[in-house]
Amino acid sequence: MKILVINGPNLNRLGERDPLIYGGKGWTDIEKKIKTEYPTIDFDFFQSDSEEQVIEKLSSANKNYNGIVFNPGAYSHYSVAIRDAVELLQIPIIEVHLSNISGRDSFRKNLITASRARGYIAGFKENSYLAAVYVLRKIL
Ligand code: DQA
């Protein structure tokens, strides 16, 4: 099984961001944790701050992966272009957020991209990613 994990803007800077909101781990540690938890799954990891690159990655994923775990970062709240790319996917995609967005700024409550994903998991810091892979495995 091949799963693509996509992270949007500023998620390469975990560890520098508020640990109370995002957890204290950097992305390298989270990546290790995902691989250790699911040793039989073949993961690819991709991060970009660029909306264009995120869209390109989503657009090429249908033929190369069984499923996607996606944290669009701030794009979650306003990118109609990324939402449209998510809508075009034929493979399942689960959106994740490290933070519990329901208890944060009101502008974060608008979940544009999640509305076109199979569902979303938020609030469990790096464990949100583990939970998303768990669900993907169940539905694939
Ligand atoms: C985030 C939540 C977003 O609101 C924020 O802009 C991020 C990270 C999360 O994982 O909690 O960059 O997607």
Image: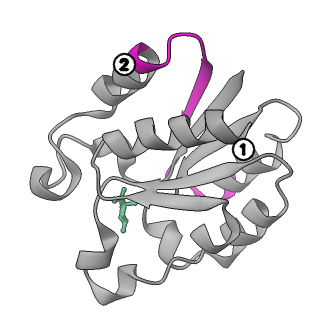
**Residue lying furthest front:** 138
Q: Position of residue 115 (x, y in %)?
A: 63, 74
**Left or right: residue 69 compared with residue 24:** right
Q: Residues within 10 Å of mark 1 (few under 14, many from 20)?
A: some
Residue at (37% x, 86% y) in the render? 107
Any mark on residue 32, and which?
Answer: 2
Answer with the quadrant where ligand 1 appears in the image. Answer: bottom left
* Lower sequence index among marks 2 and 1: 2
Residue 118's place in the image compared with 44, above or below, is below
Residue 47: in sight, yes or no?
no
**Residue lying furthest top:** 40
Q: Secondary structure at mark 2?
A: helix
Residue 41: in sight, yes or no?
yes
Q: Position of residue 64 (x, y in %)?
A: 82, 29
Name which quarter of the figure residue 129 lies in: top left
Q: Position of residue 43 (x, y in %)?
A: 59, 22
- Taking depth in this image into account, of 8 and 40 the one nearest to the observer is 40
Name which quarter of the figure residue 57 lies in: top right
Instruction: Residue type at mark 2: give it.
Output: Lys
**Left or right: residue 72 compared with residue 57:** left
Q: Is residue 43 magenta?
A: yes
**Left or right: residue 100 compared with residue 19:** right
From the image, state whether disc 2 or disc 1 is nearer to you.
Answer: 2
Residue 59's place in the image compared with 75, above or below, is above
Find out whether the residues at labels 2 and 1 contact each other: C-beta distance under 8 Å: no
Q: Which residues are magenta?
A: 36-53
Quadrant where the N terminus sits is: top right
Residue at (51% x, 43% y) in the render? 132
- Residue marked by disc 1: 57
